[in-house]
Structures are given as C-alpha cells and as structure tokens.
Image (cartoon, grey):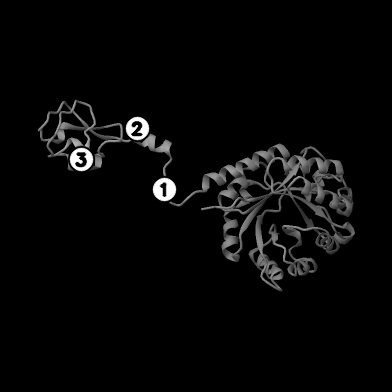
Amino acid sequence: MKSKEAYIIAEIGPNHNGDEALAIEMIEKLSKIGVNAIKFQIAVPENVYSKDSFKPEYQKQNEKSKSPIQMAKRHQLSYEQHRLFYNVCRENNVDYLCSAFDLASLEFLLSEFELPYLKIASGEIFSVDMMDVIAKTDIPVILSTGMATFDDIEKAVGLLNKYKKKDITILHCISNYPTQFEEVNMGIMSKISSTFGYPAGFSDHTIGNIASVVAVSQGATIIEKHVTKDKNLEGPDHKASITIEEFGDLVKAIRDVETIISGPETKTFTKREEEVRRSARKSIIAARELKKDDVITREDLVIKRPGFGISPLDMDKVIGRQLLVDVEEDRIIKPEYLS
C-alpha cells in the first residue's frame, strides 16, 4: 500500500532561456498547479567544459550555439538571479531545487540556501570533488542514474556514503531527449530500490505524462520532469519538455493514481457498494405460491434478484424446511418464514 504522496519536481533547467522574467512567470504558474519543487541548474561554464567538449545530437538539433560552452552561457543565470528565484519560490510556497555542475556552484548553493534536497545530475555521479562535499552534508540526496550501470550506481552510492549513511533517493532515468516508450523499462526502477535498499523515483524524459503516472503506480517516491512555457522556443530541452498546462494535468493524474492505489489492505465496502450488492446479488425466491405448513422442495425455489434474502449458497438449508407463513409466488423467502 502506498501511503505517501510522490514528491513532484518541475524541472525548468535551462528552459528560462536566460530570461529572468520568464523564469519568474514559470515559478508563479507552476506553484499554482500543485508541484512540490521547481528545479534549476547552476554552473560556471568554464568550470564544466574543456576545449574538447561537444554537444550531443539532440542539442545540435534544438540549439544553434556552436559549442557547449556558448550554449551554456546563453542560458546561464547569475548567482544573484538564483537568490531571486529562491526567494520567489519561497514566496509561492514551493521548494527551490538546483543541480550544480561544478564545485564552485555547489559551494554557492550550500552557503546561500536551505535546500530540502541536493539533486545530482546523471552526468555528475563520478564528479568526485562534488560528491565528496555532498557526502559531508546532512542534506538528503536525489541521485539520477541515466547512462549508469548497476555497478556505476553502486560506486556513486559508495561515494555518497563515504563518511556516513546518506538519505538517498535513486532516480531511474534514461538520458535520451526525448526517451521512447520502448526504452523506459520501468521494471528497473523497483530493481534499483531492492538492489540498493533506497527509495526509487523516476526522472522522465518521455513525451507526455503516461510514463510518470506508471512510475507512481509502481512505487516512485519522486517524479522529475522538464517543463517549458513553449515547446517551440529555441534551446536544448524545450522539445523534450511538457508545457505548464500539461504539467498541471500530470500533477492531477499522479494524485488521482495515488488515491486509486491507496487504502487499507482489508476489503471494505462503501455504502453505495452495499446498496448495489443488495440490488445486484440474488436470493432464494418462491417459484410458485406456497402455503403455511408446506415442506419446501427444490422445485419450489428459484434464484433471482435482489440479494438481501437467503443466499443461494444456503439452498440445502432451506429445502426440507416447513413454512410458518404463506408466501406469494416470486417473493423472497425470509429466514423467519422457516420452521
């Protein structure tokens, strides 16, 4: 039985396109649809990309910058803007989250903000400089595992637990943008949880909402999905994102499926279902007019609705009994009618 609501993260990432007003508008709109957190990304591009860095194919198709460092600079937010967005999130009663992609940016986050989670992006699980700093904190960790084998995950968890056992949620993730349904393999999510002994979630890069809903039905404790104001904007992640309106549909679908799969593990009935049961089940009915003192035979009985009389399962307990009253044809035979 699932008793706790999934923590839903709306990943703006770089989809603000470096536009402060757009980011604030997205925070305000997302806060109204029930997400738990809004996530950004933070990096000093020169600390992330070497001269040999290159853009993967999906970024070449969706973003015109010639190099990854140029692309990063186009969508970069200043530290001061992150302070602003943190405060806007707090004012709108939604958590601010942020993935750091270099050590200086991570240290900025830790020094400036009270964070409910530290989110480690899939590409950073072997960034030992950042992992060592994170391992020393008491902040719960969300670990994405796109491109990671189980051996890779084991090593990353080991890095995080170097000094003490950490509070970790491991996200099943496919680092294709967008991810096709046949690539999702949602069964891996529960295998991750059982293998490593940590709760699991899903970082969703598919088109649409169904994969996230399935993940929650399979026990995901955290859902992360990219969101954009407009899928047609230029930028690396817009086309693999859903709109704010679609994200609202996702939140509702997740909460609905949580309602569906929750509840006690004992079989109970609502008043309405009890009423339907009385109407839809069948009872033992008089097949003909019966008189007081008649001894009931099988031929005297039929099985018909409704279901509030003697159950057909008790037919043998009725046959051979003597009637204490007259019974009209096609009427229920009640227990008090029998000797």
For residue 159, the mark is: none
| Residue 163 image offset from top left, x and y in percent | 71, 74
Mark 3 vs mark 2, foreground winner is 2
Residue count near mark 3 (Cα–Cα under 10 Å), binned few <14, some 14–19, many ≥20 = some
As helix, strand or loop, the secondary structure at mark 2 comes to helix
As helix, strand or loop, the secondary structure at mark 1 comes to loop
> Is residue 234 in view from this perspective?
no
| Residue 217 image offset from top left, x and y in percent | 56, 49
> Which numbered disc, 3 or 1, marks the residue that appears first in the sequence?
1
Q: Estimate the spatial distance between the alpha carbons at disc 1 and disc 2, rounded to whole Å.
A: 20 Å
Q: Amino acid at mark 2?
A: Ser
- Residue 175 versus residue 131 in the image, above or below: above
For residue 279, the mark is: 2
Q: Residue at x 38, y 38 (%)?
A: 274
- Residue 196 versus residue 316 in the image, above or below: below
Q: Residue at x 57, y 42 (%)?
A: 256
| Residue 48 image offset from top left, x and y in percent | 85, 60
Q: Amino acid at mark 1?
A: Lys
User: Which of the 4 image quarters holds residue 159?
Assistant: bottom right
Q: Pick whichever, 316 or 208, lies toward us.
A: 316
> Which numbered disc, 3 or 2, marks the residue that appears first in the sequence?
2
Q: Amino acid at mark 3?
A: Met
As helix, strand or loop, the secondary structure at mark 3 comes to helix
Residue count near mark 2 (Cα–Cα under 10 Å), binned few <14, some 14–19, many ≥20 = few
Residue that badge 1 annotates: 267
> Which numbered disc, 1 or 2, marks the residue that appears first in the sequence?
1
Tag 3–tag 2 contact (CB < 8 Å): no
Residue that badge 3 annotates: 315
Q: Pick whichever, 2 or 275, lies toward us.
A: 275
